C-alpha cells in the first residue's frame, strides 16, 4: 500500500544514520546505492540558493544529512524504510515518488534509483513551481543515447557539474568491505579483527541542475 500524503508522520526522538532492520538482500532491492555525503555538502557550495528541499528517495539519509544540518531540508521519503528518522524534519516511507501527485513548493534533491532516473527528473519538474530547482546526482553516462538527447532538448538542465575526483555511491551503504588477499581470504589483524578497506568508485558522477522553465543552453562546469 502506497501512502499519498504526509499525514500521520511522527518525528522520532532519535536519529539513526545507517541502522536498519532490513537484511542485505532486502536493502539491495530498489536500486539502493548510498551517496558519500560530501556530494551534497559540495552541492550547497555550488548551488547555495537551494532551499525547502524534499529528498524523495532518501535511503539511509546520506545525501540528506548535510542538507538537514544546513537547515535546507524540509521532507524526506522513500519507497523503503531504511531507518533514517531525522528528529527535526518530516519523513514518510512506503511512498512511491512517481505516484505522488501533490505539488511541492520548494526544490527537489536526490540521487534517484538509476533505472528510473529520467522519470524522477520529469516527475520532479511536474511537481514544482516555475523557477524552482531539481538537483540530481547522476552518472555522467546519463547524458548518453538518442532518446536521452531528445529528453535534454525538452528539458535542458541549467547547469551540469562533473565530479572531477570520484565520489563513491556504495551498494547497500557499504562504503567499506573486508580486505581480501589474492586467494580471496578475508584479512585479519593481530587481534583477529577483520581489516576493512574503503571501496573505490568505478563511475563518474555529476550534479545535474534543472530550473523549471529554463530553455536555454546548459552550462557545463566541474566541481571538487
Ligand atoms: C540510489 S539510492 C539513493 C539513496 C539516497 N538518495 C542517497 O543518495 O544516499 C535510490 C533510493 O531510491 C529508492 N527508491 C527506488 N524506487 C523508488 C520510488 N519509486 N520512489 C521512491 N523511492 C524509490 C530506493 O529504495 C533507494 O533508497
Image (spheres, grey):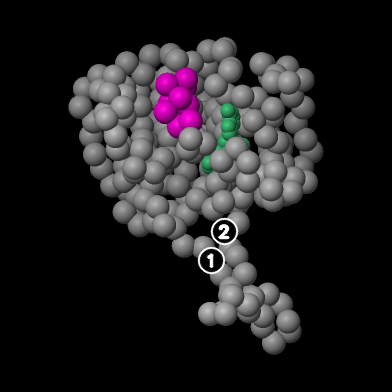
Question: As drawn, is 23 to the left or to the right of 61?
Answer: right
Nearer to me, 45 or 39: 39
Label 2 beta carbon within 8 A of ligand 1 = no
**Category of crowding for the residue at label 2, using alpha-carbon neighbours closer than 10 angstroms: few (below 14), some (14–19), many (at least 20):** some
User: Where residue 68 sits in the image (x, y, percent)?
Assistant: 58, 38
Give the residue pinned by disc 1.
198
Q: Which residues are magenta?
A: 116-124
Is 130 situated above or below 176?
above
User: Where residue 195 sits in the image (x, y, percent)?
Assistant: 63, 75
For residue 93, say whether it is visible: yes
Question: As drawn, is 138 to the left or to the right of 186?
Answer: left
Picture quadrant of ligand 1 = top right
Is 82 situated above or below 8?
below
Question: As drawn, is 150 to the left or to the right of 134?
Answer: left
122 part of magenta stretch: yes
Label 1 beta carbon within 8 A of ligand 1 = no
C-beta proximity under 8 Å, tags 2 and 1: yes
**Category of crowding for the residue at label 1, using alpha-carbon neighbours closer than 10 angstroms: few (below 14), some (14–19), many (at least 20):** few
Identity of the residue drawn at 57% across and 24% down: 97
Is 208 situated above or below 193?
above
Q: Earlier in the sequence, mark 2 or mark 1?
A: 2
Picture disc at residue 175: 2
User: Where residue 12 sits in the image (x, y, percent)?
Assistant: 77, 35
For residue 44, say whether it is visible: no
Q: Residue furthest left?
A: 217
Identity of the residue drawn at 47% across and 37% down: 114
Task: Using the numbered discs, state the Cα–Cα distance from disc 2 to disc 1 in whole angstroms.
Answer: 6 Å
User: Where residue 198 sits in the image (x, y, percent)?
Assistant: 53, 66
Amino acid at each position: 500500500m502506497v501512502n499519498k500524503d504526509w499525514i500521520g508522520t511522527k518525528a522520532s526522538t532519535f536519529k539513526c544514520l545507517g541502522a536498519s532492520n532490513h537484511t542485505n538482500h532486502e536493502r539491495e532491492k530498489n536500486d539502493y546505492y548510498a551517496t558519500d555525503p560530501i556530494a551534497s555538502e559540495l552541492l550547497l557550495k555550488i548551488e547555495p540558493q537551494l532551499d525547502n528541499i524534499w529528498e524523495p528517495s532518501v535511503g539511509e539519509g546520506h545525501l540528506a544529512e548535510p542538507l538537514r544540518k544546513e537547515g535546507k531540508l524540509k521532507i524526506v521519503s522513500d519507497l523503503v524504510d531504511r531507518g533514517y528518522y531525522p528528529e527535526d524534519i518530516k519523513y514518510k516511507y512506503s511512498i512511491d515518488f512517481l505516484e505522488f501527485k501533490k505539488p511541492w513548493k520548494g526544490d527537489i534533491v536526490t540521487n534517484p534509483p538509476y533505472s528510473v532516473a529520467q522519470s524522477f527528473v520529469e516527475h520532479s519538474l511536474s511537481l514544482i513551481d516555475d523557477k524552482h530547482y531539481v538537483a540530481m546526482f547522476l552518472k555522467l553516462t546519463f547524458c548518453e543515447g538518442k532518446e536521452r538527447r531528445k529528453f535534454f532538448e525538452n528539458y535542458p538542465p541549467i547547469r551540469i557539474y562533473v565530479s572531477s575526483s570520484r565520489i563513491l555511491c556504495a551498494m547497500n551503504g557499504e562504503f567499506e568491505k573486508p580486505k581480501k588477499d589474492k586467494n580471496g581470504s578475508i584479512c585479519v589483524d593481530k587481534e583477529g579483527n577483520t581489516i576493512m578497506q574503503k571501496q573505490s568508485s568505478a563511475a563518474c558522477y555529476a550534479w545535474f541542475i534543472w530550473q523549471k522553465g529554463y530553455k536555454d543552453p546548459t552550462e557545463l562546469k566541474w566541481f571538487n
